[in-house]
Amino acid sequence: MTSLARWCLRRRLAVIVVWLVVLAGTTLAAFLAGSAYSDDYRLPGTESGRAAALLERDFPARGGDDTIVWHTDDGTVRTPAVEQRMTAALREIAALPGVTAVGDPYRAGAGDGAISRDGRTAYATLTFTETAGDPDAGLVRKVVDTARAPAGDGLDIALGGSSIAVTEGANSHLSEIVGVAVAAVVLFVVFGSLAASLLPIATALVGVGTAAMGTVLLGHVMTVAGFAPMLGTLIGLGVGIDYALFIVTRHRKGLRQGLPVPLAAERAVATTGRAVVFAGGTVCVALLGMLVLGLDFLTGVAVAASLTVCLTVAASVTLLPALLGLIGHRALGRRERRRLAHEGPRPETPTGLAARWSAFVERHPKALGAAAAAVMLVLALPALSLRLGTSDQGTNRASSTTRQAYDMLGRGFGPGVNGPLLLVAELDGAADRLAFDRLPDRLRHTDGVASVGRPQVNGGGSTGVIAVVPATSPQSRATSDLVDRLRSQVLPGSGPRVLVGGPTAGYDDFARVVLGRLPLFVGTVVGLGCLLLLLAFRSVGVPLKAAAMNIAAVAASFGLIVAVFQWGWGSELLGLGRAGPIEPFLPVVMISVLFGLSMDYQVFLVSRMYEEWLATRDNRRAVRVGLAETSRVINSAAVIMISVFLAFVLSGDRVIAMFGIGLAAAVALDAFVLRTLLVPALMHLLGGANWWLPGWLERRLPRLSIEPAEEREPDRTPDAVPV
């Protein structure tokens, strides 16, 4: 690492130019290639996946779910004035290039089921020409504007569906701007130097920007979820700014000791930079643990997020030292430079709140440890009610057109119309077709079924489909129970093999597969993380405590997610929509990210304790000194990461908001409750057992040094310090 830092310092302008060229090149390539993300949760081996494959093959026209919904309280939708306005709008939409077909409930025979029984609500299906991915956003906005033009005079119009949702995505970078701005303020308060506070921001932005463009290109070679770029940005900004913060803090310490700028930067990268590489490696290991699930949808997320972390680490150990060499002594504030020039270097000893807090924990480890454990337990309790399932457009913000369309359809036709189940069967001969035609009579008498459509058969007569409207909404547990009941009790023995598909069935199957593989995934992530810590700290107790603390942080953060998003505590006030189940993929991604981030703080805290333990073999002193010297920078890093994560609540995306709130809560609890309270309290109670390792294992483990002790005296003549 020393050689790398020295090379980057000597060729700092070339390093900066190379990073900017790489950023510009990937940006240009991403712009030319365009995005190719996918939010297809279907699993080919599941029943819903097989049903979807049959529908795509034999009923391609049923692929869309977009609708135009209108409602009036003045008379009915058949009133001539309403009918004329809506008919004209539907014809205008049908004539738009890129629109394949638009339904018309006013056409003779077409209004059956498309106009509510009270006559106040109607809807028309909408099909776009684009079948692979989302249609052009400009076209969708034109459709929305055209459809809503007749609204007014008692007529309400809204549009729903997955394509319509394109117009409601986060179109600005407000969340990133707010997060970076807050981080800049915190950095300036910590450093007291504008130049030093801008370095972590610049380093993170270059690394994250390059990774974001790389993620766009990655979507062309593998399945990458639509939320992956913003998730990568969220993680990358958080860890990128924090990693640079740690290195700049060590560099400033070297300058205050009287080291010349190049030597201070070299030692910062050689010591803290190695810890950054190790910490980033643990984050990547945790993220890549998703590969054991064997799900293409999550594999793309893991690779994209890992790419972001790798590039932010690379920027921290190459671009950052080049920038440190460029700004010279301006990494220190004016007051610090003036004092150093007049008084010279002087030893730094932990003082202030950090030192007093460390001594306080040392005196009361039992009481403080018990209080911290109680806080984590209480916050984790809601996680016992976690329910994975369909989080549809009914959970969108009340002001969104998709939510309004969802509510209109639910009031007019019943909540189940927003997510009908599709029963699909391959028909082999007349006997199968006859049994399939009789199936609706049996389905109408099934509990939880509101209505059943007429059987439809493809042109060759080989495949049939029946639409079943549940009595409850797609995200209701009762709808999931209906899917299970149809599969296990109603459909077996009805003739041909009937598959249950549709959004709810697809989400339920996805959740079932994820939960089934979750133990293997958690075991892999925890096992690899413990192995890395075992190699680094040569202790059995340190990795075991780290695993326990990580699980506690995950459980508490999920408790908060359940309270806000599933129970709806404040979700509408925060602009996050109403309560609903938790996305099936969220636990896997959250566990990966949280285990990685929690390892970061564990590494930076325990590495200083371990260094002091090796020097003194005094556990109480090691814990006290390690906590006193690292708690301030860890807390500052946590505040930055929390600010970045919470800013993503402004993105307008429910999934990203879940990640933002969950990660912010986990980091806050990890930094302020676990690492600065519960972990040191436990280490005081365990004493020398913290560092115990069986002799036979000690002899067989390879040596891995995270942060070697830096030299005490400068080996070069100090530079003159500009005042």
Image (cartoon, grey):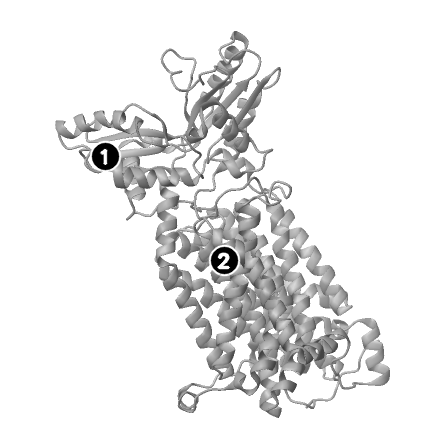
* Quadrant housing residue 519: bottom left
- In the image, residue 338 above or below residue 513: below
- In the image, residue 702 above or below residue 86: below
Q: Amino acid at mark 1?
A: Ala
The residue carrying pointer 1 sits among few (fewer than 14), some (14 to 19) or many (20 or more) residues within 10 Å by Cα, namely: many
Is residue 30 toward the left or the right of residue 441 in the image?
right
Quadrant in which the N terminus is drawn? bottom right
Q: Which residue is mark 2?
A: 590
Q: Which residue is mark 1?
A: 425
Instruction: State the separation of the CA atoms marked 1 and 2.
Output: 37 Å
Q: Secondary structure at mark 1?
A: strand
* Quadrant housing residue 313: bottom right
The residue carrying pointer 2 sits among few (fewer than 14), some (14 to 19) or many (20 or more) residues within 10 Å by Cα, namely: many
In percent of width and height, residue 382 lies at: 53, 53
Q: Which residue is at the front of the view, 681 or 463?
A: 681
Query: Does the residue at mark 1 contact the one at mark 2 (Cβ under 8 Å)?
Result: no
Q: Secondary structure at mark 2?
A: helix
In percent of width and height, residue 159 lies at: 51, 28
First reached walking from the N terminus: tag 1 or tag 2? 1
- Tell me what residue is drawn at x 37 percent, y 45 percent: 508
